[in-house]
Amino acid sequence: MNKKARRTAVALVTGVVSIGMLLSGCTPSSSDNASPETISQDDIDKAMTTPTKLTFWTWVPDIENEVKLFEEKYPDIDVTVENVGQGLPHYQKLRSAIEAGEGAPDVAQIEYQYIPSFVLNDSLLDLTAYGADDLSGDYVDWAWNQVSPDTEVWAIPQDVGPMGNLYRNDILSQAGITDPPATWDDYAAAAKTVKDSTGSYISNLGATQAGQMIGFLWQAGVKPFGYDGKETVTIDVNSDEAKKVADYWTNLIQQDLISTDVDFQDQWYQGLASGKYAGWLTAAWGPIFLQGTAEGTSGAWRAAPLPQWNEGDNVSGNWGGSSDAVLASSKNKIAAYELATFINNDEASAMKLATEQFLFPPQVSVLEDPAFVDQESEFYGGQKVNQLFAEISQTVDTDFQWLPYMDYVYSTYEETMGTVIAAKGDIAQALDTWQDQLVTYATDQGFTVK
Amino acid sequence: MSHSPALTAERPAGPPLPKRPTSPAKRTQRRAAYLFLLPFFVVFLSMLVVPLVYAGYLSLFESKLIGGEAFAGLANYARALTDPAFLEGLGRVGLFFIIQVPIMLGLALFFALALDSARAHGSKGIRLLIYMPYAVPAVVATLMWGYLYGPDFGPIAQISRAVGLGTPDFLSPESILGSMMNIVTWEFVGYNMIIMYAALRSIPGELYEAAEIDGAGQFRLAWSVKIPAIRPALMLTLIFSVIGSFQLFAEPSLLNAIAPDAITNSFTPNYYAYNLAFINQELNFAAAIAFLLGIVIAIVSYFVQLGGERSERRERALS
């Protein structure tokens, strides 16, 4: 190597090392996040008429249509929509970009359970100064609490997944069951009847589907997680109520009345289409999803609320859903906030999301709009499925929180709960193991565990 | 021949010539050579050396979600060496190496010898058929096998049920490693075969003639002439297999989707490092694991090579 090349190589290596030092030395300080007390209308008008480029990371298909509405209203703002992957890959890239200090978008789609992990390192912009508080009444309470567990508002709700019961009317009728089971006891009895007389499982419990199980815990009033937004977490996945839920499923699984196939895989798709499962306990995004998956069974399905723990109750849990957050690093905070709000709050845009992208809406106005709730669905024998889930949406427990490290929570769920469910073991015991791992991780990572 | 004394004697004697200034033509040539080498060094530096240095640097720190980063010395390495998840993963890929590699290389050698013996008809077609799986990316291969292994709708299970043998569970915690060995063997037999076959083709014909005159049959020919002659090629495939086995990643990470209860997040060290970095957000610990894995691979490769050389020496001494 000649002298020059050697010098360049040395420069390269030292350059990278010093970048590394910079990275480790400066985590974004919270002072960058400080926003003015309030933003005046003048500020907004000025921001929205200044030519601006925004980047929006989302995996919602065809959301360009909603973005177009925004750009028509604000011709000076140019939005680039980028899909960097759904779920985990999306968050990994988002974290990398935040850590690197460049390349992060202005607005990003974030599922509710991941909001705390971005609040943790001050990556999200508190939207209260921009007037987000005024929007709280536009959304069902529990959905709003997901983006605003305290006084701050971290994101604008986009869609939610209140849970219900989709079932095969034909299979249940064949087993002599005319009404959907009202309580979990009824459900267990029905599971036996269905299995005995038709050979079908009444439903499948995805062995490693943390989202579904957490939804069941949510319905049962369990408060497994808590985070104060700073350094304290509460972890209680093995409470008595949680164990009641665990024992219920252990019992059904061990009697072979519920299958535990891994969901969202070939095996499971085929099971839904072929009648291996006579139902699916799923979220409000499930009905449309199922239509694409089990086309051949159109007309045979019905929707009902989740079975209840106590007769006469009417409560549900939530599985999935996401929001749009503004990153603290955005250079065009006002425009970014307006984009996040417009997409999810503008009447036309929100309606489009609900009826064209089939995202189940958290907005009260859409949930009450006849154009949405009065849709009759042929796949469900002409039932007004949207209306049913709109009603269920009012019954979700408002007070549910997440830990600021849900990637780890889900991954350890798979390791502890998932393996036990697949092996038809004692789920309640697995809850204890899971609890231990979550507490150990929290302590190792410097959190105070309450 | 070049070692014959007669030739050495013809070399010009006397003191070494003083270094002459290089002619302009030579210099241009040299510059061109560097220019051609440049792309390699740029990629080598930016994609290998720099990330390596950075990973080594990272592995000396400890970062927490609360409290940030602090210098930790070798603490991450100490933790890794006592981490049962990491050690079990290493044991698993070790087992994988001991069982799968001999099968794979044995098959590859068998096919290479069979094709080389020219007894097989349509050897070109067969060669292509055996090689083809290697052209399928590991991701696609794993997805495909994942379907074939399926307990309800997979063809293997359906046939097995049809003939009354029940449903084999290829994706259970007990059998997943074997299923994975099968996928990797399927993928790489052809690749290794081609390397061996190419080496077989370059054996000089005189050796065969000599063996034939001595009355050697096909088996004797293969055992005493062909296999020793392609020893370097065999060594090469073996070293590649060491590296491949210990770095196993695509197969576990993809099979995890259909057999999540059978594949833990520390199933192989590489997969563990990935999960530590991107799920647990323990980048520093992941860097230490990656470094240790590299060291383990270097050590195993060294011993494999040493073993190969030793048996070669022994053989020479015998003959």
Image (cartoon, grey):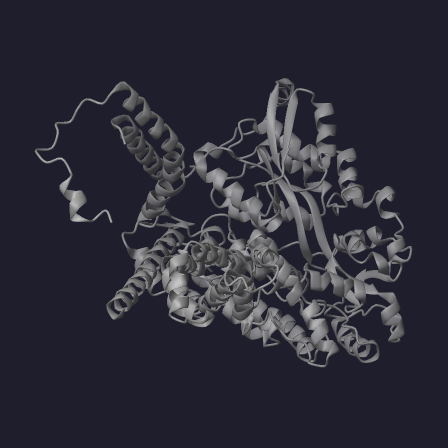
The image shows residue A338 at horizontal and vertical percentages of: 65, 30
Left or right, residue B267 beside residue B298? right
Name the image quarter holding the N terminus of chain A.
Answer: top left
Residue at point 88%, 62% (across, down): A300
Q: Residue furthest left?
A: B15
Snapshot quadrant of residue A42:
top right
- Nearer to the camera, A263 or B208: B208
State whether residue A262 appears in this view: no
Left or right, residue A44 beside residue B244? right
Residue at point 11%, 33% (across, down): B16
Left or right, residue A112 beside residue B221? right
- Location of residue A128 with respect to A295 vertically, above or below: above
- Nearer to the camera, A278 or B176: B176
- Nearer to the camera, A34 or A112: A112
Snapshot quadrant of residue A211:
bottom right
The image shows residue B186 at horizontal and vertical percentages of: 56, 62
Left or right, residue A377 beside residue A435? right
State whether residue B230 appears in this view: yes
